[in-house]
Image (cartoon, rainbow, N blue to C red):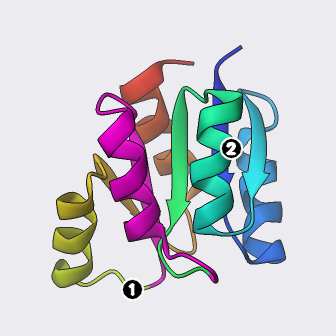
Amino acid sequence: MKRILVAEDNDSNYMLMNYVLKRHYDYFRARNGQEAVELTEIEKPDLILMDIKMPVMDGLEAARLIKAKHPDMPIIALTANAFDSDRHAAAEAGCCDFLPKPVNAEKCLQIIAKFIGE
């Protein structure tokens, strides 16, 4: 089963991702960008769902660090700020796609499948 790292500091948002992913993928959580970077090295996920606004290290910085070591890692940005400037910043940081919050379950699964299948 494909493994997904969910980098999300907010418990209610993580619970939503749990609901979306539980029947399709194996997944685990990082509560901030620094944990996401560390867990990527240890757990070797197939894809990362990366919240942009997190404590300790934000998702954009974490994405840059992860992409520097793992250029083929698919990272999907998650953010409540769905402005074009946010999409552009996520793309510049190495994110390959973008999901606005609150996340639509069907759209989320479609985007994940596009990169790693079901």
Residue 61 magenta-highlighted: yes
Q: Nearer the viewer, residue 40 or 16?
A: 40
Report x, y in % for residue 89. Answer: 22, 73
Report x, y in % for residue 66. Answer: 42, 46
Disc 2 is placed on an element classified as helix
| Residue on which disc 1 sits | 81
Quadrant housing the C terminus: top right
For this view, does 17 lie left or right of residue 105?
right
- Residue shown at 46% from the left, 61% from the top: 62
Question: Callout 2 environment at 10 Å: few (<14), some (14 to 19), or many (20+)?
Answer: some
When asked about the image quadrant of residue 39, the answer is top right
Bounds of the magenta span? 55-80
As displayed, is residue 45 above or below residue 102? above
Q: Nearer the viewer, residue 39 or 24?
A: 39
Disc 1 is placed on an element classified as loop
Question: Callout 1 environment at 10 Å: few (<14), some (14 to 19), or many (20+)?
Answer: some
| Residue on which disc 2 sits | 39
Q: Which mark is residue 113?
A: none
Spatial separation of the CA atoms under disc 2 and disc 1: 25 Å
For this view, does 94 lie left or right of residue 41?
left
Q: Amino acid at mark 2?
A: Leu
| Count of marks overlaid on the render | 2
- Residue shown at 48% from the left, 83% from the top: 80
